[in-house]
Image (spheres, grey):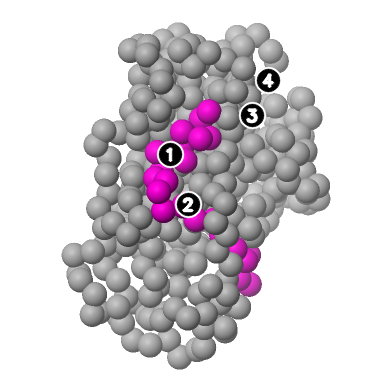
Amino acid sequence: MNIKITGTGSYIPDTIEKNDAFHEHTFLNNDGSVINHPNEVIIEKFQAITGIAERRYAKPHLNSSDLGFFAAEKAITNANIDPETIDYIIVAHNFGDVKHNAIQSDMLPSLATRIKHSLRIKNPKCIAYDILFGCPGWIEGVIQAHAFIKSGIAKRCLVIGTETLSRVVDKHDRDAMIFSDGAGATIIEATEESGGILAHETASYTYDEAYYLYFGSSNNQELSKDTRYIKMEGRKIYEFALNHVPQAIKTCIDASGVDIKDVKKIFIHQANEKMDEAILKRLYRLYRTDIPEGIMPMSIQKLGNSSVATVPTLLDLVRNNKLENHKLTKGDVIVFASVGAGMHINAITYRY
């Protein structure tokens, strides 16, 4: 028995927010002071570092659970399964459903419950629950699904990553330009086909690093201190990722028994183009070998950082030949990896 991804689906919102939409924003430093650069310069530097030229926002009437439902429908159709046969629905997110122009997060009932309801699944033995694991949430959901199936208590799981980060950003913070909305979903199941999950690795660094990403007040000191937004210590996160993610990926690859030269694609969480490139360089430096051309698909330039949705969305795009110069062939060894709030890191080595 092997445990494989048998179906994928993603929901990429229609609304495109390009960088020039931020030209009229009033960006402030963390202490509320004015940034002594025109917005054109701020945005130009931002794009040079992150690679982001545009991002996607959900339409006002749609919430995170809606996006997850749309992606789940596609994954179920792609896998050609009866949704009543799903044993677990695992939904990774960070903020629940945040309605457009609202300031509260709604997680009662869970997003997994809402998505199961929308899918009209009657089976009470289909267990629906959420996980809060920062940006690595979808990968961790897949690891949990793998454990359920390997132990024999499940045969088929639906793992979803969904987020509407555009609704929790501080418009006075330059980091607001990073975040976007979207959803990705996968069917994970036991199969007689060759391949599947070969190894996985997870770590949580909380002693000093727990609050590198957090909920904080606006940079605009005149706004209410009680309204919270996603905030991050960008430099600390960058250094943390470079110090820990390459080794985690190496540990995962080595545990699978696969040679680094046999890895065809590495799907890294789309957080920051320069950071992902630096992680890749350090990984291959650990192996003392050159980086193969086309090893790392990227979607951040047009889709931004949709947190838990980036990796499954990227996988869905490549599987369906929707990302130029990237494709997967049966038997290819690929790696999934992520880093994010917690601070958590994880990786999976997988034979396609």
Q: Which residue is mark 4?
A: 195
Q: Which residue is mark 1?
A: 66
Q: Which residue is mark 3?
A: 350
Residue type beneath disc 2: Ala
Could you give the CA–CA distance between mark 2 and mark 3, rounded to whole angstroms?
Answer: 31 Å
Disc 2 element: loop
Residue type beneath disc 4: Gly
Could you give the CA–CA distance between mark 1 and mark 2, rounded to whole angstroms?
Answer: 10 Å
Compared with residue 187, is residue 35 higher up or lower down, i.e. above or below?
A: below
Residue type beneath disc 1: Asp
Residue 70 vs residue 202, the one in the foreground: 70
Identify the mark at residue 58; answer none if there is no mark: 2
Compared with residue 122, is residue 242 higher up or lower down, i.e. above or below?
A: below
Q: Are there few (<14), some (14-19), or many (20+) residues within 10 Å of tag 3?
A: many
Could you give the CA–CA distance between mark 4 and mark 1, rounded to whole angstroms?
Answer: 32 Å
Please name the residue shown 68% across and 26% down the image.
Answer: 351
Labels 2, 4: front one: 2
Label 4 or label 1, whichever comes before in sequence order = 1
Compared with residue 59, is residue 258 higher up or lower down, i.e. above or below?
A: above
Please name the residue shown 64% across and 37% down the image.
Answer: 316
Q: Which residues are magenta?
A: 47-73
Label 3 or label 4, whichever comes before in sequence order = 4
Q: Would residue 62 be counted in the magenta stretch?
A: yes
Label 3 or label 1, whichever comes before in sequence order = 1
Q: Are there few (<14), some (14-19), or many (20+) residues within 10 Å of tag 1?
A: many
